[in-house]
Image (cartoon, helix red, strand yellow):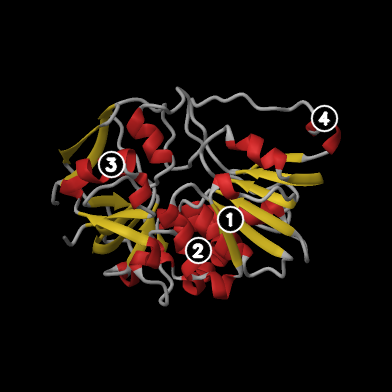
């Protein structure tokens, strides 16, 4: 068995590659060689900066307390290189997705892997967790025919959410981000998507039926409240970690009957769980990846050995990025 090179967060703004010996392959396991893994510019940057809460992460792939040193990541696409004696031969050489930290190789049971549907390329499959998050956000928001919708934040989750919302027969769809590159990502598609985009300072003083807060900044909740109409909904998809901000819940909010909806992908809304499960939501997510082809929003590709540069870029110059990935073929 080869050793794996695995990325570890070791202290605030410190990462390193460590050689990690792989266990012997058991009869019911497979060995996967990684092709691509995507960096989560939201959650991973909280880990990188040391801003994560001292509690268990809600993501299924991490069950222990978050503390350094930590191997963290959850968007890994690879190829099955070896299979155990009891594993169906159809798994050999199959391209699979795994909620796996950034690493060159890993051992897994097949039931913990998700085979890629044939039409979905590995680069698009890297977006699976974020697209599932976008699907969950839209389901929680439940847009209605003719509604006015606002998306605050055009990071990867925001862009994917806006892309899904653009398929609805809305009255209008507006997106807001302070980074020009991210606004332009939607502008390139604006004729097809019919999306209006603004910087925060240029957002019009209008109100919306449904607002998605996806900036990662808790202070953006004030902007969301200010732009939500009477009895409107605000879906909060950001994970703020230890960040805090003063939120204005006085004034008009007290009489507004605005609903604040906490949305996180690890669970399905109780209103839907009688009809929906994770398997059904994944099916919808794969179909969305095939339609939207999000690999066009990959702005940077690094080898795993260049991890320092990748995280430094996201930390110091996020305005230059949309999606950053590790390419294990570099």
Report the front residue among 301 and 96: 301
Q: Mark 3 and mark 1 in contact (Cβ < 8 Å)?
A: no
Q: Mark 1 and mark 2 in contact (Cβ < 8 Å)?
A: yes
Report the front residue among 237 and 318: 318
Q: Which mark is residue 311?
A: 3
Q: CA distance from mark 2 to mark 4?
A: 34 Å
Residue 211 shows up from this direction: yes
Q: Which mark is residue 175?
A: 1
Q: Say which residue label 2 marks.
A: 186
Image position, residue 85 (x, y; %):
26, 61
Q: Say which residue label 4 marks.
A: 254
As drawn, 325 above or below 65? below
Identify the residue at image location x=84%, y=38%: 257
On the image, which quarter does residue 127 sit in? bottom left
Identify the residue at image location x=46%, y=51%: 155
Sooner in the amino-acid sequence: mark 3 or mark 2: 2
SS for dot 4? helix
Sooner in the amino-acid sequence: mark 1 or mark 3: 1
């Amino acid at each position: 068995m080869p050793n794996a090179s695995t990325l570890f967060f070791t202290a605030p703004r410190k990462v390193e590659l460590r050689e990690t010996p792989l266990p012997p392959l058991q009869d019911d396991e497979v060995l996967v060689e990684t092709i691509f893994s995507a960096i989560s510019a939201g959650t991973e940057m909280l880990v990188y900066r040391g801003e994560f809460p001292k509690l268990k992460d809600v993501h299924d792939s991490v069950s222990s307390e978050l503390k350094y040193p930590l191997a963290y990541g959850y968007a890994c696409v690879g190829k099955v290189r070896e299979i155990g004696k009891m594993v169906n031969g159809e798994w050999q050489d199959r391209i699979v997705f795994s909620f796996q930290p950034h690493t060159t190789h890993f051992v897994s049971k097949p039931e913990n892997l998700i085979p890629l549907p044939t039409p979905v390329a590995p680069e698009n499959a890297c977006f699976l967790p974020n697209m599932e998050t976008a699907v969950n956000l839209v389901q929680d928001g439940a847009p209605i025919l003719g509604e006015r919708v606002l998306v605050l934040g055009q990071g990867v989750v925001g862009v994917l959410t806006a892309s899904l919302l653009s398929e609805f027969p809305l009255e209008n769809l507006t997106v807001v981000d302070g980074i020009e590159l991210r606004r332009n990502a939607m502008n390139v598609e604006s004729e097809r998507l019919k999306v209006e985009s603004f910087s925060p300072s240029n957002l019009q003083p209008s109100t919306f039926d449904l607002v998605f807060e996806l900036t990662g900044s808790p202070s953006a909740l004030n902007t969301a409240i200010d732009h939500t109409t009477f009895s409107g909904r605000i879906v909060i998809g950001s994970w703020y970690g230890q960040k805090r901000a003063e939120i204005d819940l006085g004034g008009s909010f007290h009489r507004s009957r605005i609903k604040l909806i906490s949305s996180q992908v690890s669970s399905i809304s109780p209103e839907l769980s009688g009809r929906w499960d994770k398997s059904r939501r994944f099916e919808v997510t794969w179909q969305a990846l095939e339609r939207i082809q999000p690999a066009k929003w990959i702005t940077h590709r690094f080898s795993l050995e260049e991890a320092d540069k990748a995280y430094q870029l996201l930390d110091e110059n996020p305005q230059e990025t949309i999606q950053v990935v590790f390419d294990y073929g570099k």
